[in-house]
């Protein structure tokens, strides 16, 4: 069997003109090995050779995913100081902290592809990089916190479970841990909704109002319809995406409608009905103009979300500088100690 080729191997062969086609031959061999790994579901690891498009697609998707986790803290964080009890406050605080952790795992996983956290964050703050459309909607009542856990984390799980089996090792491994935590998030959201739906008429109305506002944006989380999805076909060939946007959206609807029934809440879609022949729910048209408007930066909270992230970045600058100065001091101290033969 042919030994696996690593990126460092490419460096041994400079692409000189007149190398007798050697470089092209090596590239072809690298590509063939990469394709064979993808077909055999063997994970691609950071030191493996990979096509430039694969690397760029992963950086795009993983960094946007990381940004979504970070910006995604904001709508729920808005309710930490107003949670209805100490228990709810502690749970919400833990959930929001989990989202920060997810962002950090994903930034670290993306860094294995040769980008840096600084570059990724700069792209978020400049508005160049996207983050999930869903986090540009406001959280108006406590029921929104329940609805985010139930629907948004629920949609995130459906989208992310297949990512645990995606072709890039560091992404797949990060997703396994993330999905375990998302599962707890989804349950806590559904539990809030159960309490509200079985509470007073006012509480139930609040739960219904939240579901009515978040339903359609939750369906948009899965991305544009397959026919308009620019990246899906190639991402599926590369094993980055295992299911299409429409397939995952349908799965989410099929799973969530019975849950809404259980809560005694109505989905705000008059065309929603079970289709026996298809074995799925049929649903009404999604307002894709709204989706594109939000991802272009014009949703209800886009400006506010970026304003808060930019301020956090500015406020934290002194701390990052202090950490870097401390690390530098330690390194020079250790270097001096090592030079003098002392243990570090
Ligand atoms: N929002 O060609 P496709 C969470 C963009 S985490 C904004 O179909 P692709 C946890 C897309 O980037 C939620 N932009 O793209 C949590 C592309 O633009 P580009 C985030 C969107 O990548 C819960 C263009 O449209 N999850 O919720 C959206 O193949 C509670 C064309 O689209 C992930 O990121 C959108 N919804 O498929 C946290 C999961 N959809 O980049 C806190 C990983 C599409 O070419 C609280 N990502 N676009 O300029 C994915 O699975 C994929 O990237 C998709 C999009 C499915 C999101």
Image (cartoon, rainbow, N blue to C red):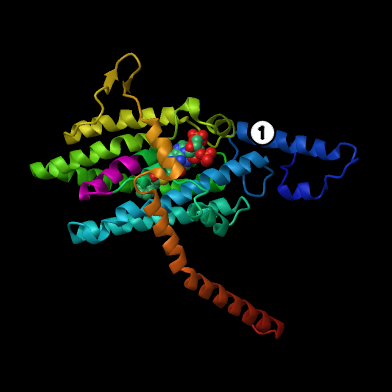
Which residue is under mark 1? 35
Q: Residue at x 78, y 50 (%)?
A: 11
Q: Residue furthest left?
A: 200
Q: Residue at x 73, y 43 (%)?
A: 5
Disc 1 packing (10 Å; few <14; some 14–19; many ≥20)? some
Left or right: residue 135 versus residue 169 is left
Left or right: residue 300 versus residue 208 is right
Residue 75 on image: x %, y %: 32, 52
Q: Nearer the viewer, residue 113 or 125?
A: 125
Residue 311 on image: x %, y %: 42, 63
Could you say whether the residue bearing mark 1 is in a helix, strand or loop?
Answer: helix
Q: Residue at x 67, y 40 (%)?
A: 51
Q: Residue furthest top?
A: 277
Left or right: residue 207 versus residue 115 is left
Give the residues drawn in magenta, as a range.
139-154
Ligand 1 is within 8 Å of the C-beta of the residue at disc 1: no
Q: Residue at x 77, y 38 (%)?
A: 27
Residue 163 visible (yes or no): no
Residue 113 on image: x %, y %: 61, 50
Against 285, is 41 above or below?
A: below
Residue 175 on image: x %, y %: 46, 46
Residue 140 on the magenta span? yes
What is the chief secondary structure element of the magenta stretch?
A: helix
Residue 217 on the magenta span? no
Q: Nearer the viewer, residue 233 or 158?
A: 233
Residue 167 visible (yes or no): yes
Left or right: residue 32 versus residue 142 is right
**Quadrant location, the C terminus:** bottom right
Against 264, is 9 above or below?
A: below
**Quadrant location, the N terminus:** top right
């Amino acid at each position: 069997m042919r030994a696996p080729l690593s990126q460092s191997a490419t460096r041994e062969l400079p692409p000189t003109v007149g190398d007798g086609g050697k470089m092209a031959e090596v590239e072809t061999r690298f590509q063939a090995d990469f394709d064979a790994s993808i077909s055999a579901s063997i994970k691609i690891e950071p030191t493996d050779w990979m096509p430039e498009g694969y690397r760029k697609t992963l950086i795009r998707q993983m960094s946007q995913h990381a940004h979504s986790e970070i910006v995604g803290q904001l709508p729920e964080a808005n309710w930490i100081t107003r949670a209805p009890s100490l228990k709810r406050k502690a749970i919400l605080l833990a959930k929001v902290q989990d989202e920060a952790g997810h962002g950090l795992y994903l930034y670290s996983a993306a860094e294995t592809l040769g980008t840096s956290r600084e570059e990724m964050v700069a792209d978020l703050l400049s508005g160049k990089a996207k983050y999930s459309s869903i986090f540009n909607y406001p959280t108006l009542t406590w029921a929104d916190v329940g609805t985010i856990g139930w629907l948004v984390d629920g949609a995130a799980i459906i989208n992310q479970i297949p990512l645990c089996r995606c072709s890039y090792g560091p992404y797949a491994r990060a997703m396994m841990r993330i999905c375990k935590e998302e599962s707890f998030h989804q349950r806590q959201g559904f539990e809030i909704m159960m309490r509200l739906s079985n509470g007073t008429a006012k509480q139930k109305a609040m739960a219904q109002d939240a579901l009515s506002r978040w339903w359609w944006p939750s369906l948009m989380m899965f991305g544009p319809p397959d026919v308009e999805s620019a990246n899906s076909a190639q991402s599926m060939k590369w094993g980055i995406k295992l299911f299409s946007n429409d397939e995952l959206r349908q799965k989410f609807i099929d799973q969530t409608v019975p849950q809404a029934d259980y809560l005694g809440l109505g989905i705000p879609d008059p065309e929603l009905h079970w289709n026996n022949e298809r074995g799925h729910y049929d649903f009404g048209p999604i307002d894709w103009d709204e989706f594109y408007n939000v991802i272009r930066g014009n949703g209800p909270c886009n400006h506010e979300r970026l304003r808060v992230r930019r301020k956090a970045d500015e406020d934290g600058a002194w701390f990052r500088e202090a950490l870097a100065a401390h690390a530098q001091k330690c390194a020079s101290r250790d270097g001096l100690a090592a030079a003098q033969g002392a243990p570090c």
